[in-house]
Image (cartoon, rainbow, N blue to C red):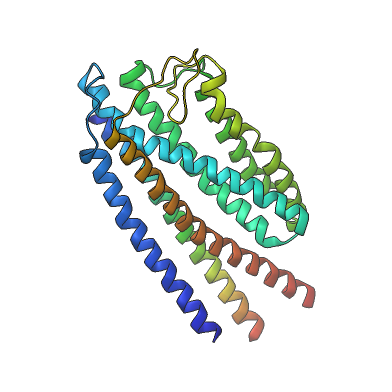
Amino acid sequence: MTAHKRSGRETFWMVFTGITGVLILIGVYMSLIWAPTALNLPTVNEQLAQRVFYFHVSAGWVGYVAFGVTAVASVLYLIKRSRRFDNLAVSSAEIGVVFTAANLVSGSIWARPTWNTWWTWDDPRLTLAAIVLMVYIAYLMLRNAIDDPERKARLASIYGIVGFISVPLSFVSVRIWRTIHPAVIGTASASSQGGFDMSGNMVITLLFSIFTFSLLYFVLLHYRLCLEDQRVELEEYKMAVMADS
Amino acid sequence: MVYIAAGMLVFWIATFAFIFSISRRQRTVEEELSVLKESTES
C-alpha cells in the first residue's frame, strides 16, 4: 500500500515536472519572439537586451519567494522543532541563492547596453540585492560549519528569520531611495528615474514567465527536499550505528 | 544579440548546474546509505 502511494506521488511529480518543462519552453518562446520589441528604446542592443528582463524579474521573484519560505519554515521549526521544517528552510534557501545569483548576473547583462556599465555600487537596489545574496550564502556556510544537527537547525532558523529583513528592504528600495533601477511592480516613487511602461503583451509575457518560474521553484524544491530527507536518514542511520557499536 | 544570448545562457546554466548538483548529491547519499546498510546487515 505504501509502495503504491509512493509510486502515485512519484508519478505526480514526474507529470508536474514535464508540464513545467513545456510551460517554460512556451515562456521562452513568448519572451524571445511573441513579446513585442521595446521600440521606444534608442538602440537595437537595448531593445534586444530588454527581453532578458522577463527572466531577470522572474528569477528575482523566485528568489524573494524562496527566502520567504525559508523564513516561514525557520519560524515553524523554532515553534514545532520538527526536522522537516529545517529541511524545507535549507532547501528553499539554496534555490533562492541560485535564482538570486541568476537575477543579479542577468541584470548586469541587461545593464551593460542600457546604463553603459555592468554594475554600480551607487544604486541602492543593486547593492541590496548583492547583500541579500551574501546573507543567504552566509546562511548556507553557517549550516556547513556546524556539526550538531540540533544546534545547526536552531542557529540557522534564527539566522533565516533575521536575514529575511534584507529581502523586503531590497524589494522596496526602488521606491524609497533614489535609484536608476526600474520599478516593475507598482508605481515608482517620484524620485525613481527608471520607471517604464509595458504594453499588454509584455505584461502577459512577464506574468506567464513569473508563473512558470514559480512552478519551476516547486519542482526544484520537491527534488531538493527529497535529497535533504535522504541526508537526514543517512545521518540518523550513522548515529544509530555509532550508538550500537 | 550577444546580451540576450548571454542573459539566457547564464540563467539556464545556473538552473541546470543546480539540477545536476542535486542529482549528484542524491546519488552519493544513496550509495553511502546502501553501503552502510549492507555493512550493518552482514
Residue A181 seen in render = yes
A227 up-or-down from A46: above or below: below
Q: Which of A9 and A240 is in front in this view?
A: A9
Question: At 45% across and 25% down in the image, what residue appears?
Answer: A183
Question: At 24% across and 16% down in the image, what residue appears?
Answer: A42
Q: How many marks?
A: 0
Question: At 59% across and 34% down in the image, what residue appears?
Answer: A167
B29 up-or-down from A128: above or below: below
**Quadrant location of the N terminus of chain A in the rendered image:** bottom right
**Quadrant location of the C terminus of chain A in the rendered image:** bottom right
A14 up-or-down from A43: above or below: below
A152 up-or-down from A120: above or below: below
In the figure, residue A149 lies in which quadrant? bottom right
Could you tell me residue A194's position as x and y percent?
Answer: 41, 18
Could you tell me residue A109's position as x and y percent?
Answer: 35, 28
Q: Left of A118 or right of it: where is A141?
A: right
Residue A144 seen in render = no
Could you tell me residue A2's position as x and y percent?
Answer: 55, 83
Q: Left of A169 or right of it: where is A208?
A: left
Question: At 30% across and 20% down in the image, what residue appears?
Answer: A113
Q: Which of A116 and A231 is in front in this view?
A: A116
Could you tell me residue A235's position as x and y percent?
Answer: 67, 66
Q: Which of A207 and A232 is in front in this view?
A: A207
In the figure, residue A44 lies in which quadrant? top left
